[in-house]
Image: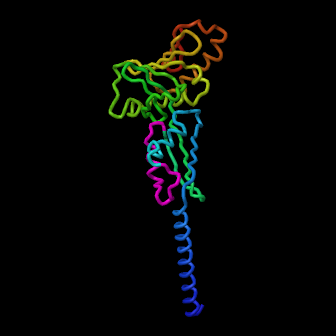
């Protein structure tokens, strides 16, 4: 290729880049001039949680109606700021706010998922899957396992379920939440002053002594044999105490 041909190619390429840039700038300018006429809110209820509704989300977006989005040009709407407002809500895990080609605002909200509820005289709150504390809600009551906890177990600055020790209890709760059988069967969980766990079942008058939250899957496998093969034959009220704390054995009394 000759020198003149190379120069022509470079000029053409440069003009193409300038043209594309000009078109993008023109498109962006036209988009900013569009008026928001409608706000569409979608709330993900994958786990059938209803802790926040369209009305609450709209209130967060508009500062309780003080600054409505409808009628505003796109250039006056700060999408990132709107996302931060929604995500400040305790029951919101993630929020996305974006504008469509028509200039209207689309909002997608993903809710936090409580997996347990701590019940004490000085604390009645939910725990989510990451160990965060969530307040109770007047809007909706989550069907999760309630936990009573010895007063000897003091929370750290991060909270009981957020430090290295608490993570083992959180893993136990996550296991229960993800297992349909045990989620339905276990009615209550207690953590005593030594950190040992016990459960009260939905069916039967016995207490399940689980011990420390270690070898969780192995212990539940032992319990599954008792619940699916032994108790249906022997009777659900046959025992008052079932202990799976120790390796390779189940103690029933």
Q: Nearer the viewer, residue 36 or 121?
A: 36
Q: Is residue 87 magenta?
A: yes
**Residue 156 at what x, y percent from top left?**
33, 31
Q: Quadrant of residue 217?
A: top right
Q: Quadrant of residue 120?
A: top left
Q: Is residue 120 above or below residue 136?
A: above
Q: Is residue 211 above or below residue 110?
A: above
- x 61%, y 16%: residue: 227
**Residue 154 at what x, y percent from top left?**
33, 25
**Residue 116 at what x, y percent from top left?**
49, 27
Magenta region: 68-91
Q: Is residue 74 above or below residue 156?
A: below
**Residue 158 at what x, y percent from top left?**
36, 34
Q: Quadrant of residue 222?
A: top right
Q: Is residue 31 magenta?
A: no
The quadrant the N terminus occupies is bottom right
- x 47%, y 25%: residue: 117
Q: Nearer the viewer, residue 207 or 119?
A: 119
Q: Is residue 147 above or below residue 94?
A: above
- x 52%, y 49%: residue: 96
Q: Nearer the viewer, residue 16 or 61?
A: 61
């Amino acid at each position: 290729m000759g020198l003149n041909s190379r120069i022509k190619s470079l000029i053409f390429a440069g003009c193409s880049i300038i043209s594309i840039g000009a078109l993008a700038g023109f498109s962006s300018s036209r988009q900013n001039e569009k008026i928001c006429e409608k706000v569409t809110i979608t709330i993900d209820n994958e786990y059938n949680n209803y802790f926040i509704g369209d009305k609450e989300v709209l209130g967060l977006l508009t500062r309780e109606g003080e600054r409505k989005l409808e009628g505003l040009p796109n250039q006056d709407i700060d999408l990132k700021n709107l996302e931060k407002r929604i995500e400040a809500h305790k029951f919101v895990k993630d929020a996305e706010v974006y504008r469509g080609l028509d200039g209207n605002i689309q909002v997608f909200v993903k809710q936090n998922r409580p997996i347990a509820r701590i019940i004490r005289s000085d604390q009645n709150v939910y725990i989510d899957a990451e160990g965060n504390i969530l307040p109770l809600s007047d809007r909706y009551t989550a069907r999760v396992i309630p936990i009573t906890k010895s007063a000897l177990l003091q929370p750290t600055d991060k909270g009981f379920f957020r430090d290295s020790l608490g993570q083992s209890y959180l893993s136990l709760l996550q296991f229960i939440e993800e297992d349909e059988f045990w989620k339905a069967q276990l009615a209550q969980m207690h953590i005593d002053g030594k950190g040992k766990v016990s459960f009260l079942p939905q069916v039967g008058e016995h207490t399940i002594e689980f011990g420390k939250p270690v070898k969780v899957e192995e212990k539940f496998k032992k319990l599954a044999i008792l619940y699916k093969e032994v108790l249906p034959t022997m009777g659900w009220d046959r025992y008052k105490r079932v202990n799976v704390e120790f390796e390779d054995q189940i103690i029933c009394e």
